[in-house]
Amino acid sequence: MNSLHLAAPPSSLSHQRDQSQRDQSQRDQSQRDQSSLGWLLIITLCCLCALSCRRDRAEQREDVLVVSVEQHSSWIRNFNPFSPNARRFTRAGVYEPLMIHNSVTGELTPWLATAYEWNQDYTELSFTIRRGVKFSDGTPLTPRDVVFSFMYLQRYPALDISGLWSIISSVEESANHQVTVILNEPFQPKLHDIAQHIIVPSAIWSKITDPVAFTNPHPVGSGPFTEVNVFRSQVFELSRNPHYWRKGRPAIRSLRFPAFPSNDQANLALVTGEIDWAGNFVPAIDRTFIAPDPNQRHYWFPLVGSMVNLISNTQTPPFDQLKVRRALSEAIDRERVVEIAMYSYTRPADSTGLSDGFQKYHDESISHDYQWADYNPTHAIKLLRDAGLRRDHRGWYLPESQDPISLTIDVVSGWSDWVRAAQVISHQLREIGIDARVRTSEFSSWFDRLRSGRFELAIAWADDRGSPYEYYRWLMGSETVKPVGESAAGNFHRFGDRAADLLLAQLKRGTSKAQEQALVNLLQRRYAQLTPVIPLFPNPQWGAANRQRITGFPSQADPYAPLSPNREPECLLVFDRLKPRASLAHGGER
Amino acid sequence: MAFVFKRLALYLIALVVSLILNFLLPRMMPGDPVGTMFARFRGRLSPEAMDALQQSLGFTGESLLDQFWSYLSALSSGDLGLSVAHFPTPVTEVISAGLWWTLWLAGISVLISFTLGTALGIFIAWRRGGVLDQTLPPLFALLGAFPYFWLAMLLLWVFGFQLGWFPLRHAYGDDLEPGWTWLFISDMFRHAALPALSIVLATLGGWMLSMRNTMISVLGEDYITLAQAKGLSSRQVMLRYAARNAILPNLTGFGMAIGFVVSGSLLTEIVFSYPGQGYLLVQAVRAQDYPLMQGLFLTITLSVLFANWLLDILYAVLDPRTRRST
């Protein structure tokens, strides 16, 4: 029988036949095969069961605040306050500034300095340094440390990120525990930058040979949370400073930062109640985050972020014409943009282009006088005709051109809210006959186009840096205008105005409160007259909190600071008020 | 032994070529690291600080050739430079934050997927036409055809969020101190279970099908019939005659897979918040972080080369013909 088989061609048919013949002799074997497979399955299942059994976890402690900021898959240890890549709260938590600019109230809160004072012509700024402040190693913070912290930037220009030493000429210690900053020229709007400079211990930092490449793994600072007790790639903890100068503060023991590489994961943890404080974007927040526990969970998105603008290259036709810019503005239905792109978390901009961060300067009458930020497509078409553009069935034409205008709106791919906004805008521009397409690109190439001025339309932020002076300087200041092709640091729309320059110069020189208000009002009016950019909506500051374990967060009802962990140094104001709920006899609810 | 050394020489050449490519490829991308760094400050960086930072980052505008020489000389002393995106942390430190977790998670899932898939492939080919042969291939082909992102999200949602059987994120419990304790190791397994399961489900079908197909064609060979005719036990015929020959293409695939393990599985890391190389690589590309990209590419190339070299040796052991033909 065997020889017969060898002679036969091994076709699959014969295989199957001889397999059936073999079956008898194979049975034991195959049963063993099958049983071993069965065992494998059983073992796998057992493993899965064992793994899925819940381990008895230590209850999340009541006095630890779990925060979700920065998105990284693993943490890299860096507590160098001068480094742009320092972990969050290094600059406001481990270290502290002289004063804190509160973007909600618009006030400067005294912190390491108890007061500030300008001289007559706004060239010298004196800070009175608080007495009794200690660093976390127990050594006192003296005016010497303050002077040192400023001089340090002069010694290492790579650390001087906001360019303080381009306007400071020297820093001196003076009598009565004071430090005086002497400027090159009168420059009142720089007050915020100077006052928010962080103070480091001179005894330690004077010994660092290369502070630019220093990661400061064991920081010594004056802030509420200085001790790095836990630092692992997926979680780290900052604990209470044993020598903190504010008595009895902070009431919470430590801050805990789990690493989340994406918004989705952070939102999942927010929804399950594992995070107490978050600063990431949450879609449909009322349904996803608030609904499970409306009493303890709240969010507050104050519109104090920078204004988001549709910018056009005002040095190239047709955008050099005011009427065209206004026509584009009136063609945009901002209500729709806000609803679709921003889940109605913000409001449409008006013709002052001011976000709520500048509310105290806002002049209501201007938005009545200038209505180019209201949706009015028929008037937009009239404006285009007035500007000398022709129209046929293919679209709008420039006066001497044969081809219809075709525009590109540049946005950064992955910035989904702006991409959605650009899509809505492109749709609305097409409705008045302007062919506008959305182009998404990587940040660096998008940014390259903006800086060099080689774009037509783009969605971009307004640079405000917390002061109306900076806001208007980057919108209309002639000195910030760079020719197309040359790389610009701001004012990508390349718009300058002489009248605005004069107002800015007065603002810079320093004024009284009332005078400042008057100047900002004039600048507002100038902006509304000129439409340098097309404002869309103010950016909200994302902030959500879960008060189940910890209370004292700011809210719309108690707006003492913004509810956003992304706001350094204002989060210091929040840390100061936070309290564990345990003291309120809250047990047994979970 | 001569065979091993001959192979080694070939790999050295491959290494040199990849070192050059490592250097060139990131620099061929549009944009530059200084621009992107500037971008992250949203224009807040003063020009003086920018110049000084460029100096300390090592972007001094020297020619490509000079850059290449300093890259090589630093490399020869094991210095991968400082990362730009995580400045001033050294690249080696950044990579080591993710490398071990990637090796652990991707390693274990590729191993499980390969062994289980190959074993199932052998088995269903041997009993072709059986119940398992009719159900498993279409089932796993279906699972493999799902978008991986969706499959992983589904697993996370069902087993992590709804049923609460598995942790939702991370490689171990946040409240645990890493160490060789039973608690920590069991926790590591628990955390790896769901991500590993998702990878295994998505890739098992490939291993199984390729093994099954080669196995079936091998089973048609004369020597199988001969082996059976000699009266060898069916286990011996299945494993030593059929599977040993049929496994060679799968082993090649395994070598490649082991190499790519090191590059991490980006989607797994994102869905399960698992630390690893994949996300670092994406961050590096986004920030145009040349040193970090070079470091990551280097670990990937080295491990692909190393895995293939090991595999070459294994091949020679399994199949004597490869020894003679070279």
Image (cartoon, grey):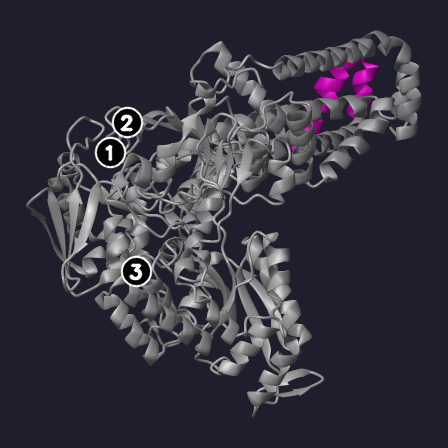
Mark 2 lies on residue:
A241
Task: Look at the picture and state if B117 lies above or below A477.
Answer: above
- The amino acid type found where label 2 is placed reads Asn
Q: Bin the neighbour count of mark 2 within 10 Å (Cα to Cα): few under 14, some 14-19, many 20 and up.
A: many
Q: Magenta residues?
A: B221-249
Give whichever of A543, A319 is nearer the camera: A543
Q: Which mark is residue B63?
A: 3
Most common secondary structure along the magenta stretch:
helix
Q: Bin the neighbour count of mark 3 within 10 Å (Cα to Cα): few under 14, some 14-19, many 20 and up.
A: few
Q: Earlier in the sequence, mark 1 or mark 2?
A: 1
Chain letter of the residue carrying label 1: A
Question: In which quadrant of the rendered image does the N terminus of chain A lie?
Answer: top right
- The amino acid type found where label 3 is placed reads Ser
Q: Which mark is residue A221?
A: 1
Disc 3/disc 2 C-alpha distance (Å): 49 Å
Q: Is residue B247 magenta?
A: yes
Disc 1/disc 2 C-alpha distance (Å): 8 Å
Q: Which mark is residue A259?
A: none
Chain letter of the residue carrying label 3: B
Do marks 1 and 3 share a chain?
Answer: no
Side of A337 relative to A100 (left or right): right
Task: Please tell me whether mark 3 or mark 2 is closer to you in this view.
Answer: 2
Verify CB contact (< 8 Å) between mark 1 and mark 2. Answer: yes
Give whichever of A586, A257 is nearer the camera: A586
In the rendered image, residue A156, in percent from the top left (x then y), is placed at 18, 50
Tell me, yes or no, if residue A74 can be seen here.
yes
| Dot 3: element | loop
Side of A29 relative to A531 (left or right): right
Task: Look at the picture and state if A514 lies above or below B53.
Answer: below
Disc 1/disc 3 C-alpha distance (Å): 42 Å
